Image: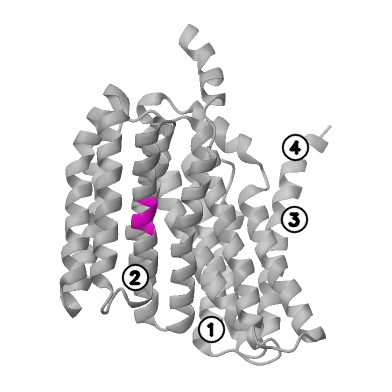
Amino acid sequence: MSDTRREPAAESAVRVSTLELFFDLVFVFTLTQLTRLLADELDWTGAARVALMLGIILWMYGGFAWLTNAVVPNNRLRRTLMLVGMGGFLTISLAIPDAFGDSGWAFGVGYFVVNAVHSGLFVLAGGPGASRAMLRLAPANLTSAALVLAGGFAPGGWRWALWALAFAVDVAAPYVRPIGGFTISPSHFVERHGLVVIIALGESVVAIGVGAAGLDVDLPLVVVAALALTLSYLMWWVYFGDGDEAAEHALAAVPEGGRAMVAMRAYGYAHYVLLLGVVVAAAGTKKVVGHAGEELKLAEAVVLASGLALYLAGDAAFRRALGLGNVRYRAAGVVLALATIPLGLVVAVGQLGALIAVLLLILAVEARGSLRPATRP
């Protein structure tokens, strides 16, 4: 009983440091690069490349979020190793545009460095429980890193196969090797992942400026830019509208023995889909801003709608994993978002407006549902 009373105080002391935020800014450069790659390669091959690389990269970003949840970077050695990890992520980011070409070796080397720093720092400074848990998980992580490294030097189809296998190892690892030994501080964990989502959403705002580059600043451009900003704002509202407190309380309410697996489902698997949606939506926004009064190509309309659909699906999975209310309206929003594709083939700005209407409808219906019980006599 006394342990339970002390828990909130201990958790409140674990907040995200400025070094972690700096680390996240380097990581988000990978999302910028993936968005640019998808915008330049709007086909199934480009989409598959982006989805595969994001899955591989996000696994190790999540690993560092777990790491700093247990290891505070408060001395010179730890901060130096964090810098090495940041260098690994920067190398990965620089390699992304041609990762399936001549830069594959840099992607593989950067990923191996990130993985080695993560495993080493966790084992050395994570404490007895976290160290034992990491020693169980480290073989799977290092196997994945070795596959990515080998794939970076392999030709053509072998690179696809080795990187896909590495991604599969990452996804399966928590089920094959139990992760119950990790201690999760809900306040730090929720805040850290919320920060990377908000920074990633900032990428969609940057995409507005990139799409408008070289265009005359006239009324139509201002209108479409404002609509694109509104879409990004409503995506923020979908995720952050309830505040961080609800997610913190939900995660804290999970017994410690099962908290790590719930955190993996909510902030690992679900956030992969959610962040993939941000990347895809940003690529679609970039295309719309440059063709506001025109019809979109099929691939462009599909990307714009699919970005929001993936985002809503990831958010619904995230909320379902934490038990944060009924997610049926957000699941319905996935279908409604995809239904806007034909409108984009007529006029780009019309599809953008329709996607905004979808989000407004979801939020309005949810708000009305949350108020209904309180108004009953």
Q: Quadrant of residue 47?
A: bottom left
- Calculate the distance from the C-alpha at mark 1 to the C-alpha at mark 3: 28 Å
User: Which segment did they paint magenta?
Assistant: 85-89
Name the residue carrying label 1.
Answer: 300
Residue type at mark 4 is Pro
Residue at (75%, 83%) from the top-left corner?
221
Magenta region includes residue 195? no
**Which residue position is annotated with label 3?**
364
* Picture quadrant of residue 162: bottom left
Where residue 208 sits: x, y (%)? 64, 74
Neighbour tally class for label 3: few under 14, some 14-19, many 20 plus, Cα within 10 Å: few
- The answer to the question of whether label 2 and label 1 lie on touching residues, with beta carbons closer than 8 A, is no
Q: What label sits on residue 95 in the rendered view?
A: 2
- Given residues 243 and 329, the one toward you in this image is 243
Label 1: state its secondary structure. Answer: helix
In the displayed structure, would residue 229 be above or below residue 76? below
Q: Is residue 345 left or right of residue 34?
A: right
Q: Residue at x 59, y 53 (%)?
A: 198
Q: Position of residue 202 (x, y in %)?
A: 61, 61
The image's mark for residue 373 is 4
Extreme residue toward the front, this view: 76
Give the left or right position of residue 255, taking residue 167 as reference: right
Please name which of the two marks, 2 or 1, marks the residue nearer to the observer.
2
Q: Nearer the viewer, residue 134 or 316?
A: 134
What element does badge 4 sit on? helix
Rounded to the nearest whole Å, what is the CA distance between mark 4 and mark 3? Answer: 16 Å
